[in-house]
Image (cartoon, rainbow, N blue to C red):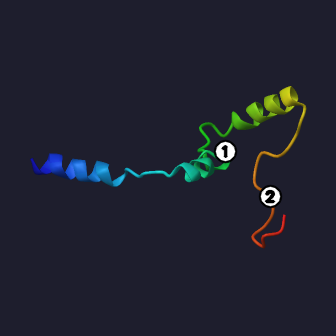
Amino acid sequence: MRVVLLLLLVLAAGCATVKPQERALLADPIMQFDGDPLANPRVQHAIDNREGSHGGAGVSGGGCGCN
């Protein structure tokens, strides 16, 4: 019984309510984990060729606030 209660407490600690205005920040591609670091450059290359654009996929600038 104690083990089940402890398990429920541990699982409940990981739950969080996300406000609608915060969902855009969490859906930002920069917040996503990279599944396969070797496949990402190939996928980005295919997207660049398909869209006819290059760059814009990442964070620029230093820590000073100027871009």
Measure the alpha-carbon separation of dots 1 and 2.
Answer: 14 Å
Residue at x 65% of width, y 47% of height: 28
Disc 2 residue type? Ser
Residue at x 80% of width, y 31% of height: 47
Residue at x 19% of width, y 52% of height: 6
Q: Residue furthest top?
A: 50
Of the pair 55 and 20, the residue shown nearer to us:
20
Say which element carries label 2.
loop
Disc 1 residue type? Pro
Q: Position of residue 50 (x, y in %)?
A: 84, 26
> Label 2, on which residue?
60
> Label 1, on which residue?
29
Residue at x 66% of width, y 49% of height: 30
Q: Position of residue 40 (x, y in %)?
A: 71, 37
- Count neighbours of disc 1 (C-alpha within 10 A) and say few if under 14, some if 14 to 19, many if 20 or more: few
Of the pair 12 and 61, the residue shown nearer to us:
12
Q: Position of residue 34 (x, y in %)?
A: 62, 42
- Count neighbours of disc 2 (C-alpha within 10 A) and say few if under 14, some if 14 to 19, many if 20 or more: few
Image position of 24 (left or right of 9): right
